[in-house]
Each structure stands twice: as structure tokens, then as C-alpha cells.
Image: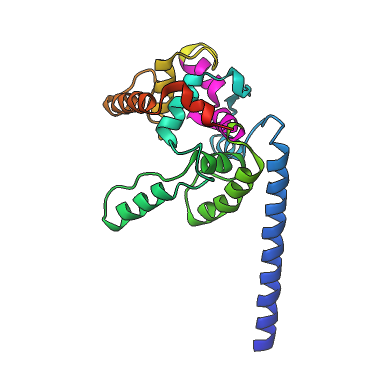
């Protein structure tokens, strides 16, 4: 009996390894494909459409047709060290770990690269399985894509309201304009609600969103304005 149980366990482990390797190979192939091909939809879009039983608003636009102000505002809000890290911000991770140890409220430590990997290939619910899966996918993305491409895909896949994905859909949904024509203030409003896009409104910002807007505007100035974008390769 013991020998049979051991054989079953070894067989299960082998199958699990094969499944994981196969899944990683498939994800790697998709990452290589989307290095050049516009992303028509993401895993998160499919998940949320299934849960809500409704469609989504989304229109891919290339990097050049997205407002520089939005690019800068999103990096100021979400990941100021994005041009220099390799997918994982160790400083933010250390700060989050220290906050957890001290019992303080946690601040997200996910980089734009991690969020892009999650949006593209994973699911929304934050758990250890998803966090573990983010690591190899983020690493593959960082090795395969330039920073401009990662930011381009992120801005085309981020959720800005229920069923509203990407900068173009968000610009038209909230401001009746294009992603390219967004003003600096509109860009800051959109960036300010990214942590909770289904709760916060860029059109009718509450006190917390207004505070974030002021902070983002200050950070954009400290980062050197649009010259910061030239650091992206």
C-alpha cells in the first residue's frame, strides 16, 4: 500500500511539473507574440466579462497616440522607478514588508511590469498563487520587451471603470476625447483613480482622489516632467 501511494504521489508530481512547464511555455510564446502584435484582449478582461456577464469597452492605440501626460502621470502614481528596475521594485517590497511587520496599512508594491503580466495572463484576485505566477511572467516580459512596450501594453489594458479598459476607452468614457488629446489635468485624474477604478471617479473626485491628484502633480514636477519619458528604452 505504501509503495502504491508513493508511486501515485510521484506520478502526480510529474504531471504537475509537466503542467507548470507547459503553461509557462504557452505564456512565454504569448509574451513573445505580443512583443509586436497589438493585444486584442487580456485574461483579466475575459475574467471580468465572465463574472459580470457583459462585454467591455477597449480600443488598442499605439504608444505614440497616448498622451505623454498620461504616461508620466501613471508612472508618477504607480511606479516611479519603472525605467530602472528589472520588473521588481525591491525598495517598495521592503517598505511593504516593514509595514506588515509593524501592523501598519499595506501599500501595494506591484510594479507596472507586474501589473502588466497580471492583466495580460493572470487573474484579479490577489493570492499567493497569483503572486507566485507573476514572478516568472514578469521576468520573461522584462527580458523580451523594452520598457516602452511594457508601458504601452499596460496603458492599453488597465481598467478605468467597470468594463472600461485602456487609455483610449477611458478617455472617451470620461472626457469624450482621445487618449492622445488628454490634457495634463485629465491625465492626472485618470492616474489618481487607478488603485480603485470601480470606486473612485476621475470626473467627480472625492477628497481622497483630490489629495492623490495633488500628490501626482507634485511628483510629475519632481520627476522632471516629460523629459523623464526619454529614459524609457
Q: Classify residue 178 as left or right of residue 33.
A: left
Residue 136 percent across, percent down from the top left: 60, 53
Residue 211 percent across, percent down from the top left: 28, 27
Toward the viewer: 200 or 149?
A: 149
Q: Residue at x 68, y 42 (%)?
A: 31
Q: Classify residue 133 as left or right of residue 111.
A: right
Q: Residue at x 48, y 42 (%)?
A: 111
**Residue 4 makes an appearance in the image:** yes
**Residue 161 makes an appearance in the image:** no
Q: Residue at x 32, y 27 (%)?
A: 209
Judged by its main secondary structure, the magenta piece is helix
Confirm whether the magenta stretch covers residue 170.
yes
Location of residue 204 with respect to 79 vertically, above or below: above
Q: Quadrant of residue 60?
A: top right
Q: Classify residue 75 as left or right of residue 113.
A: left
Confirm whether the magenta stretch covers residue 151.
yes
Magenta highlight range? 149-174
Residue 106 percent across, percent down from the top left: 33, 47
Amino acid at each position: 500500500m505504501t509503495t502504491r501511494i508513493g508511486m501515485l504521489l510521484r506520478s502526480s508530481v510529474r504531471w504537475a511539473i509537466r503542467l507548470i512547464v507547459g503553461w509557462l511555455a504557452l505564456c512565454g510564446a504569448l509574451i513573445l507574440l505580443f512583443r509586436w502584435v497589438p493585444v486584442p484582449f487580456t485574461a483579466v478582461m475575459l475574467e471580468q466579462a465572465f463574472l459580470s456577464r457583459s462585454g467591455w469597452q477597449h480600443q488598442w492605440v499605439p504608444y505614440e497616440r497616448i498622451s505623454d501626460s498620461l504616461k508620466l502621470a501613471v508612472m508618477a502614481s504607480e511606479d516611479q522607478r519603472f525605467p530602472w528596475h528589472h520588473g521588481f521594485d525591491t525598495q517598495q517590497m521592503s517598505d511593504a514588508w516593514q509595514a506588515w511587520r509593524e501592523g501598519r496599512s499595506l501599500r501595494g508594491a506591484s510594479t507596472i511590469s507586474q501589473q502588466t503580466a497580471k492583466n495580460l495572463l493572470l487573474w484579479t484576485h490577489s493570492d499567493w498563487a497569483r503572486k507566485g505566477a507573476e514572478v516568472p511572467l514578469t521576468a520573461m516580459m522584462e527580458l523580451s520587451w523594452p520598457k516602452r512596450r511594457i508601458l504601452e501594453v499596460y496603458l492599453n489594458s488597465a481598467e478605468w471603470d467597470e468594463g472600461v479598459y485602456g487609455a483610449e476607452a477611458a478617455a472617451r468614457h470620461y472626457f469624450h476625447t482621445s487618449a492622445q488629446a488628454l490634457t495634463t489635468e485629465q491625465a492626472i485624474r485618470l492616474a489618481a483613480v487607478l488603485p480603485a477604478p470601480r470606486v473612485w471617479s476621475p470626473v467627480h473626485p472625492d477628497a481622497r482622489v483630490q489629495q492623490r491628484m495633488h500628490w501626482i502633480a507634485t511628483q510629475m514636477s519632481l520627476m522632471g516632467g516629460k523629459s523623464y519619458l526619454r529614459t524609457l528604452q
